[in-house]
Structure formats: C-alpha cells, structure tokens
Amino acid sequence: MLSLQHISKFYQVGGNKNFVINDISLEVEEGEFISIMGPSGSGKSTLLNIIGMLDEPSTGFHYFVDQPVHQLKEKQRAALYKQYIGFVFQAYHLIDELTVYENIETPLIYQDVKGSERKAMVADMLDRFNIVGKKDLFPAQLSGGQQQLVGIARALIAKPKVLLADEPTGNLNSKQGEEIMELFRKLNKEDGVTIIQVTHSEKNAEYGSRIINLLDGRVESSKKL
Amino acid sequence: MIKNYLKTAWRNLAQNKTTSIISVAGLAVGICCFLLLTTYLINELRYDRFHDKADRIVRIAFSHKSADDPEAKTTSVTPTAPVPVFKQELSEIEDGVRIYDYSGNRPAAIQYGDKLLSEKKMLLADDSFFKIFGFKFLAGDRATALASPLSVVITQSTAKRYFGNENPLGKVLKVNQTRSLMVSGVVEDVPEYSQIKFNMVGNYAMLDRSKTREWSSSNDYSYLLLKPGASVPSAQAKMNSYLNKLFKDQTGGGKSWFTLEPLTKVHLYSTAGGGLEPAGNIKYIYILGIVSVILLLLACVNFLNLVTAKSAERAKEIGVRKVMGAQRGQLFFQFITEAGIITFVSLVTGLLLATICFPAFSNFSGQVLSFSTWNTSWLIYALVSLFIIVTLLAGTYPSLYLSAFKPIVTLKGNTGGQAGGNTLRKSLVVFQFVVSVFFIICTLIAGGQLKYIQNLNTGMSRQQVMVLEIGGMPYSSMEPFKNDLMQQPGVQGATATYDSPVNVRGGYSINSADGKASDFELSVIAMPVEKSFIKTMGIHLVQGNDLDLGDEQRVLTPKSEERNYSFILNETAIRAMGWKPKDAIGKHIGLNGRMGTIKAIAKDFNFTSLHDKISPIVMFPEYDWFGKLLVKTNGKNTANTIAAVQTKWHKYYPNTPIEFHFLDQEFEAMYKTEQRTGSILKAFTVVTIFISCLGLFGLAVFSTRQRVKEIGIRKVLGANVMSIVTLISADFLKLVVIAVIISSPLAWYAMGKWLQDFAYRIEINWWVFAVAGGTAILIAFITVSYQSIKAALSNPVKSLRSE
Ligand SMILES: Nc1ncnc2c1ncn2[C@@H]1O[C@H](COP(=O)(O)OP(=O)(O)O)[C@@H](O)[C@H]1O
Ligand SMILES: [Mg+2]
C-alpha cells in the first residue's frame, strides 16, 4: 500500500539540524491496522502527516500505491490524497460555521460528486453513525464524542482506502474511546480499510494488528499482534 | 458548489456581525459617495450634448489685443457681423445664430392680462435658433416658430406660469410695455446642463442693430452650425484671414481674432470671459473624479484590512477544507464569493443611501441630480462593473492570502507566521489616514482662502449696498426717485453706475494722451459713473479731487464732441501710462473718443474677481446709460430700509417690477465654483474620516481580541487600566502620526497650486497642519480607546481561562 524509505524530517535550529523524524523506514500492506505510540514530542504526528502527504519529509523516499510521492507535484499529491485518504484529528477540526450534515458533505463537494448522490451518501453515513437526529446542529452544540463521530464520518464519506487518525480518542472518555475503536475495527475487518492511528492508550493500541513505538524520531520497537 | 459557498459565506458574515457591519457600512458609504460624485461628473460632462447637432455647433470667441496691452482679452460675445458674413462667405458653415441676453442687464417686465412678471431669462435669437439647437418642441413648428419678428417661443413651465392650463399658442405677451409678442411655440423646459438657458426666446430682429453688420461693439453670443465633416480649424483660419484682410489698412498695431469653441467644450474648457452662465472648470472635474475614486478605494481598503485581520480566526477552517480536498482555486472562489456578498449588500445599501442623499446633494452642488441623470443602460453597466471591481479590489488580496495557508501549519493552531499581513494592514491604515489628513488640510486651507476673500479689504465698501437694476432708464426719470431715496432713514447714499462695481467688464482703450505717440493705444477697463460714485463706494483718492457738479455739467450736452470729461484713473492705470502720480493730474487723455483731463487718482481697489490682479481702470462721469443704482444703507434695520426702497420704487415705476440684490452677495457669487467645490470637499472630508475610523475601529477590535491573553497576563502582573489603554492605542496612533507626516507636504504642495489661481491669497500657515494632524490623532484616539478601555477593564481570569 505504502512504503517509507529512510525518511527524515528536521528543522534548522541555529546551525544545528533538529531531527523530528530520523531515518524511518516503514512498509504498510493493504488491510493493516497500525497503532503508533510514543511519548509526546517523539514525532508521531509528524510521521502521520508525512504519510498523509500533508507534510513533506526533508529527505527520503515515499511511495504511495506505487507512486513516488517525493517526485510528485503538489497538485498530483493532492489528487492522490483525495482519492485514497481520510484524516481524523484529535481536535476534531470541524468547520464551526457548517452543520453536521454540511461538514460531512464537504469532501464530496470538493470531489465534484453530484448533488443527488451526495445526499444519498451523507444520509447513509448519518444512519451508520446514528446521528441522523443531529444533522442540523452545529459543532458547538455537540459533545466531544459526537464531534469526533462527525469527524470520522467526514473522513469516511469519500470511501477512503486509508484512514489516518491522530489521537482520535485523546479528548474522549474511555467509553466513547472504546466505541470509536470498535468502529475502526469493523471498518478494518469488514471494509478492508487500511488504518494508521496515533494513540497514547495501550488498550486502544491493541485494536491494531501492529504497534510501532517511536522515540526521538526513531522506531524504537515494532511488534505484530 | 456555489450554493454551498453562498451558504458558508452568509453564515460567516452573520456570525461576525461587528466586522460585517463595519465592512458593509464603510463600503456602502464609499459607494454612495462614489455614485453621488460620478453623477455630478456625468452631469458636467453631458453638458450641451443633448442637441442632436451638438458635434457640429461651435461658439465664436472674440479676442483683442491693442499694441500697448500686455495680454489679449478674450470675450464670448461678438459684434453683429460675423454670423451673417461668415454664413455667406465660408463654405464650411451651414447656418449661424446670434443670441442676445435680453434680460441680462435687467429682467424684462412681461405683462399678460393683469399679470406682471419679471422675466430673468429672456433671449433674443435669429430665427435659425431652433434649427441649430435641438430644444424639443411641444407645440408649434420648429421651422417657422421664430419666423415673425414679433413671435416668441416659451418653455413649458413658463407657459404654465402665464397661462395656466390654457393653450399658450397665439397668446400675446407685452414686453417692457412696448412690444407685443405672440407665442408661436412651446418647448420643453431647458435642462440644467445646457449653457443656453431660457424661459422665452424672442426674435433678434426686434433689435435695431439686427440689420447691421458691425465689426465693433460686442454684445451677442454667436454660434455656428458647421456642415457635416467640415473642419473647425480650417473654418477658423478662413474667418481670421477674412478679418485680417478686412482690417489690413488699420493702423495702431492692434489685433483681433476669432476662436471657434466646440459647443460641448464651452462649459468646461472655455476661458473666454463673460459667457451666458458662469463656466465650469475641468480642473474641478478632475479633482472630484480623483476624490470619488479615492473614497471608493478607502472603503475597499477597509474591507480588505478587516478580512486579513480576521484571517487568524479562519486559519483552521481553511486548513480543514484543504485536508478535505479543497484546492486553492476553490478556496479562492469561496472567499471571493464572500467578498461578493458583502459588496452586493453594500451596493444595495449604497444605492439606497444615494437615493436618499440626492436632494441634499443637489442643493449643495447647485445642480439638479438624481439617478435619472444617468442613461439607464449606463447605470446598469456602471453598477455591474462597480460590483465586479469592488469585489475584486476588496476580495482578491485576502482571498489569495487566505487560500495560500498551509493546512498543516494552521491545524497545529499555529497561525502566527501566516496570519500576519501586519505590514500590509498597517500601510493601509496609514494610507487611509494620509487621505483623511490631506482632506482635512485642504478643507481648512480652502475655507481660509474663501473667508479671506470675503473679508479682504478690496478698497471699496461693498457691505450693505443694495444694487437695483435700472437697465438704461433715463437719468431724468431716475433722479427724482434717487433723491427721494436719499431722504429715507437708513439710506446713506445712492449713486448710479453703468456696471456693478465688483465686476466691471467694460473694455475701452486710451488712444490719445499728452506726450504719447499718435498711434498710442492702451486697453483699459472703464466705467461711466455718476459724480457721487467715489464717495458712496468709499473709494480712496490718493491725488486730486472727487467729481463735482461742474464735471457733471461738462458732459451733459447731448453732442459728445462738445463734452469735456474729467477722468479718474487708478494707480495701476497711471503706472501703465508711465507717469508719476503727482504729474498725472491735469494731463489730457482720450478714451474711445471722449476727450478730457485726469482729475484724480484712485487708490487701487478690486473691481473684478480676486483671481485677477488689479488692472488699469478709468472712471468717468457720463449720464447717457446707467445699468445699476447702488443704494448704500447704514446696515441697521435693513428690512425696513428694503421695504422703504420697494415702496418708493412702486410709486415711481408702477409698471416695472423691482429687481435688486446685495453687492456682497454678488461678490460672493463670483466664487461659486470654489465655494461649491469647497463644500463638496468638506462633506467628503467627513466621509473619509468616517470610513478611516471604521477601519481603525475594526482593526482595534481584532488587535485587542488577539491580545486578550497578553492583556490578561499584564493585568495579573499589576498593570493598570491607563497603561493598557496606552499600550494598545499607541500602536495605532503611531500609524496616524506617520500619516500626518506623509500627508502634510502633499497637501501643502497641492493647496499651494490651488492658491496660485488667486491673485489675492492667504499664506499657508504651519498651524493648519497642526490642527489637521491633531484632529486626526484625536479622532483616531477616541476610536481606538473604546476598544482598548474595554479590553483593559475586562476580567483577566476569564481571558486566561479560555486559553
Ligand atoms: N515548525 C517546527 N519547528 C521546529 N520544531 C518543530 C516544528 N514543528 C514541530 N516541531 C518539533 O517536532 C517534534 C515532534 O512533534 P510532533 O510530531 O507533533 O510530536 P508528537 O505528535 O509525537 O507529540 C516536537 O519536538 C516539536 O517541537
Ligand atoms: Mg501529536
């Protein structure tokens, strides 16, 4: 599915290179469910952003569905991203001015999906996440867990092959977190969605098929479950 | 997609009420002013274009320069000959018309039945008048309307005034009790934007001189209709070579020539003196054009500033949308849509505002203005382009700027680096205040100059002087009336003159003088006066004695060659003759055939517009023709004095309506263009300040919002309200100070130029800049301090907790 080879990311601080990601290589197969762990500041988010093509590595090779991402132009990368990836954030990042319905619909609009089709897809998604009753509310009117559900629904609406989630349960209580993990597992098992999540919770990490531990921008350990 | 954009845009605007209102208010006011000003400009520019043959009509201006004149004098009136002669001689000319302003010297008394009305706008014109000019006929026949010498064509509202709802055709009006004219046509009221304005037009043939072909004595406005395709310069050249041939034997070295002015250029470009109405000035058109564009720009700047300032708050949304797959173009379009909505709302509001403001603005500008001044399709084009231009002006930069945000940075909540645009925002605020301060300075200086003109000691006491129009009334019939007036309480003196002493126009020449060669000729302004003129008008004599009864009697014989004139010259005239004041008294001179001696020298006084330097003037007693009776009152109980004068008038002249005005009003009216521009400027200065303050207010709202946390910490650390207000206000006041520094030299330069148009002008004082700068800073401080005080008073715990 994707492959990182000798990826590094550093910031120039004074005369020194300050490595955030230090020579990481990683192969991800289609259908995997990976949990990335590590202390704060170890480079988890940066790694996820690079995988998701939101951020660029300083050096290294990055292949995504056999395309050399490091050689692609901004536009092509965006197209690839649009086609394959859904992103879920710890801070939800819903658009405050849009209703639940409209937030979920937004990616479809940017992918030029027809109006009638959009309606059906959003309705389906609302159904699936059990939030039909909330569709006309604004984010501020929802609880954190509900907001994250909307965030996930929005990430999934365009049927991505890869779901990237940066601490999706970080702001939720454990029960809400569990529900979301169940949902991820179901997506992974039933729909074959490749999932890479960043998490601090040992328990949530174990929903994955592989756990990668980062420390100071390096892979400290990696184990298959 | 569009629907989605509109929806988000609308919600965004609704949610940020303060900024939306500020943006809309600023833009709406800017658009309103822009529309008002452009309407004014359109009205000026469409002047005289409504005649279907406008592009072929020219006016003849007549210039003359005597050998001893420093420069030529150009007038818009010509003698009787050019029109008939050139119509005959030149193949280029299809037709021509002479127009005489019959009511120019005094209103005509028009009688219909028992109605006696005073008509201020009556012209006499050759019968070709309506064939050349396209005034619309409502009744009567254009081709034959002026065929009879005793016919008259009147306008619609004049018809209403005299005849009510009766059919005006065939009705007979009695003019000045002598002639009966029959109404032969009714035309639509003459539009405001016509240089030829009239209520009625009689036939030029009514005048004795109509049959003559004179080349001297200019009284008529002459217009020619050129054949299609004829060239103006070639016609003009032929006219002048004809004139040169005609006068080639004339000695004296004087020179005359004609200039053909295209009809549509007369109003704004003509420099010929004394037209049918005061000329406009293309310079002011440019100035107002620039002002209107600047106002619009200022309003756009406000919007632009507010949107970029807000960018910090929108960074997250932009990031999310990008992660959701939005391309830069799509985001750009979204933000442009928002700008478009704001612009649209502002445009509608601005249109409404302008509609409301039109009556006041018309009043103010002295022109009848409304949206009907526009051609409808033009107006639609203009509004559409205005919409597009303002949207792009106000929306492009913020949209480009916002849509370029990198999602990963914005989502980290770290907008500091990107959401800046600080330098740009600050420069824009500086720009706004540069304009505001510039306007304030201009207004102050222009106001000072106009006031200076009003209060300038012009060497003549023009206060409390009533000017009665007596238009050629015989002296014998005027004298008893005048003597009776002098008995009235409140009347200090009365004296008759040819012309109004604040605007003397009579062009004469001194063509013989002691010790000068026989072909000597010096053009001067001269004016027949009564012997009491100098005393009544308070003109100071530096040499010699005032006119007396003896001087009067020596000019009373009807035969002019037997008369012996006593002349009073001003100091400038004496200098122009090359004499010393003390030697000049008693010298013999001849003024267009009037022979006599110099009796006195008057201290220089202003007898024309203060735009011009004082030129040589000669005053001499001559009782043949007086145009005005000047009644000097003591200024106490003026209403009573006026009433007394009116009563006496009606007693002596029961069949002539009284017409009078005050001399200082007439004086001030000469600066109408300046005054008008001055008051327009004043109004727009207020608007500029308003718009700039709106912008400043908006920015203050943001900067305090952004600095809430800083303010909170400072307060926790013990800062007091005053120090926080200072902290925040200082940032903005710095910008205003910079603006004052930039603006002052610009304004100093521009107003220096403007003042050069006045021969008599004020010095630009440093305090003007201080006052303008101080005003701007004060207003800016008040605007900002509301926000900063609010911030300083807020509870620090609240702001810190929310972080
Ligand atoms: N723009 C930047 N400049 C310098 N250092 C940065 C920048 N962005 C992130 N970092 C550093 O990168 C490191 C890793 O960040 P991140 O990937 O967000 O860690 P994690 O998600 O594991 O907590 C942090 O130490 C952070 O200080
Ligand atoms: Mg992180």
Image: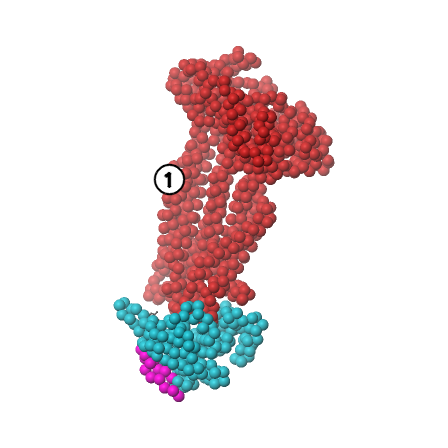
Chain colours: A cyan, B red
How packed mark 1 is, by other alpha carbons closer than 10 Å (few <14, some 14-19, many 20 or more), is few
Disc 1: which residue:
B765
Where disc 1 sits, the SS reads loop
Image location (x, y in percent) of residue B37: 52, 46
Residue B287 vertical position relative to residue A212 in the rendered view, above or below:
above
The reply to whether the magenta stretch includes residue B580 is no
Task: Tell me which amino acid carries mark 1.
Answer: Asn
Image location (x, y in percent) of residue B157: 66, 37
Q: Answer whether residue A223 is visible to the viewer in this image.
A: yes
Image location (x, y in percent) of residue B404: 42, 64
| Residue at 35% across, 82% down | A213
Residue B746 vertical position relative to residue B728 in the rendered view, above or below:
above
Q: Main secondary structure of the magenta part?
A: strand
Front-most of B722 and B592? B592
Residue B798 vertical position relative to residue B523 in the rendered view, above or below:
below
Q: Quadrant of the N terminus of chain B?
A: bottom right
Q: Quadrant for residue B474, please give it.
A: top right
Number of numbered discs present?
A: 1
Report the image quarter containing ligand 1.
bottom left
The reply to whether the magenta stretch includes residue A223 is yes
Q: Answer whether residue B224 is visible to the viewer in this image.
A: no
Residue B411 vertical position relative to residue B255 in the rendered view, above or below:
below
The magenta span reads A211-225
Q: Chain of mark 1?
A: B
